[in-house]
Amino acid sequence: MALFRKGVFKKTASIHASILTGTENKIFIFSKIIMLSVFIYSIFLPLQLGMIWFSDGLPVYLFRINRMIKHFNKEKIVAEKTLEKLQMLKKE
């Protein structure tokens, strides 16, 4: 599974390390720990399909996952353009 590969956050971590301040970097790392904890917890949480929480929560979850994917794709494009500009400046 890609989530547990060793270099999953390697590229994004190096991009964030150069852009973020100390406090922002701590928040970034803390958010990754929380996301991993919630993911692991959700594996062991029994899923009750007939509950109102499932009916209300599934559309919200799917909407937020969609927004998160769009955000990370946009962030990736911006980071790649920034890296290209930095490499061009290095060559000059």
Image (cartoon, rainbow, N blue to C red):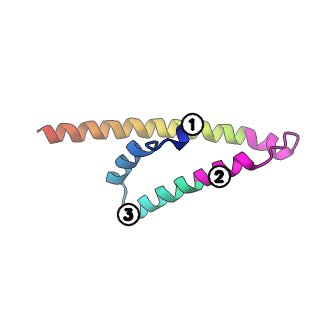
Q: Disc 2 residue type?
A: Val
Name the mark on residue 38: 2
* Residue highlighted by disc 1: 1
Which comes before the other along the chain, label 1 or label 2? 1
Q: Position of residue 17 (x, y in %)?
A: 35, 53
Pair 3/1: label in front: 1
Choose mark 2 or mark 3, whichever is in front. 2
Quarter of the image that includes the N terminus: top right
Q: Report the residue at 63% width, 41% height from top.
A: 64
Between disc 1 and disc 2, the foreground one is: 1
* Label 1 – label 2 distance at C-alpha: 17 Å
Mark 1 closeness class: few <14, some 14–19, many ≥20 residues within 10 Å: few
Residue behind mark 3: 22
Dominant secondary structure of the residues highlighted in magenta in the image: helix
User: Quick check: 26 above or below 63?
Assistant: below
Residue interval drawn in magenta: 35-58
Return the residue nearer the eye: 78 or 26.
26
Q: Are marks 3 and 1 in contact (CB under 8 Å)?
A: no
Secondary-structure class at tag 1:
loop
Query: At 52% across and 35% down in the image, what residue appears?
Result: 70
Q: Residue furthest left?
A: 92
- Tell me residue 8's x, y (percent): 46, 42
Q: How packed is label 3: few (under 14 Cα within 10 Å), some, or many (20 or more)?
A: few
